[in-house]
Amino acid sequence: MEEQIKIVLDHATQKMDKTIEHMEREMAKVRAGKANPRMLDGIVVDYYGTMTPLSQAANINTPDPRTIAIQPWDNKLIPIIEKAIMAANLGMNPENNGEIVRINIPPLTEERRKELVKLTKKISEDSRIGIRTVRRESIEELKKLKKDGLPEDLAKDAEDKTQKLTDTYMTTIDEMLTTKEKDIMTV
């Protein structure tokens, strides 16, 4: 029975880790006024008939805090990359000089910063919901085990461990949100 409890808790930990990873990816897409190559993570380009992530078809870097430079492996991809960035509707205008696609990141207005903070709060709330869902599923699994003969004290201990695990992940979400908000509001 203890082995089954461990399986339930391990499964919950894995799902909660995935929730945090998803939140990190979503937060990275929210631009905080500084250039970040991860802003382009969701963009795919038609690379010789195959839809390929931009990061696998070009070298992406940030020469300064306000610029993203994209150097494709093949110069024929430049117009395709420009179209993909425009189609992604990120509010960015790519420019090219025949070799490199540059994206200048304009400074954020106060109003836009507040919108981005709202967006990050929504992302973090979605993550909290995900964590709570995993907790609920784990507790339901533990209750099924209790019906199947798991001693009540072991079931209670496992539920307490699940709650502690949940609290730890909730704290992580709060810390990530605070860091991102501070990053967005910094001029």
Image (tube, helix red, strand yellow):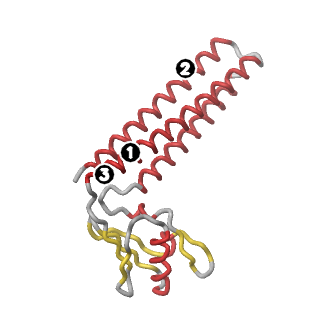
In the foreground, 9 or 83:
83
Residue bearing mark 1: 118
Specify the farthest residue to the left: 187
Residue bearing mark 2: 160
Q: Amino acid at mark 2?
A: Asp
Image quadrant holding the N terminus, namely: top right
Say the numbered circle drawn on residue 138.
none
In the picture provided, is 26 more to the left or to the right than 153?
left
Separation (CA) of disc 2 from disc 3: 39 Å
Q: On screen, 28 above or below 176? A: below
Q: Amino acid at mark 3?
A: Arg
Image quadrant holding the C terminus, namely: bottom left
In the picture provided, is 157 more to the left or to the right than 1?
left
Q: Point out residue 71 in the picture as x, y percentages from the top left corner.
A: 41, 78
Residue bearing mark 3: 113
Q: Of marks 2 and 1, which one's residue comes earlier in the chain?
A: 1
Q: Point out residue 114 in the picture as x, y percentages from the top left corner.
A: 32, 48
In the picture provided, is 65 more to the left or to the right than 117?
left
Q: Of marks 2 and 3, which one's residue comes earlier in the chain?
A: 3
Q: Amino acid at mark 1?
A: Lys
Residue drawn at x 37%, y 73% is: 93
In the picture provided, is 104 more to the left or to the right than 167?
left
Q: On screen, 183 above or below 59? A: above
Q: Point out residue 125 in the picture as x, y percentages from the top left corner.
A: 47, 38
Residue drawn at x 36%, y 50% is: 116
Query: Does the residue at mark 2 contact the one at mark 3 (Cβ under 8 Å)?
Result: no
**Mark 3 closeness class: few <14, some 14–19, many ≥20 residues within 10 Å:** many
Query: Does the residue at mark 2 contact the one at mark 1 (Cβ under 8 Å)?
Result: no
Residue drawn at x 59%, y 72% is: 51
Query: Does the residue at mark 1 contact the one at mark 3 (Cβ under 8 Å)?
Result: no
Under circle 3, the secondary element is helix
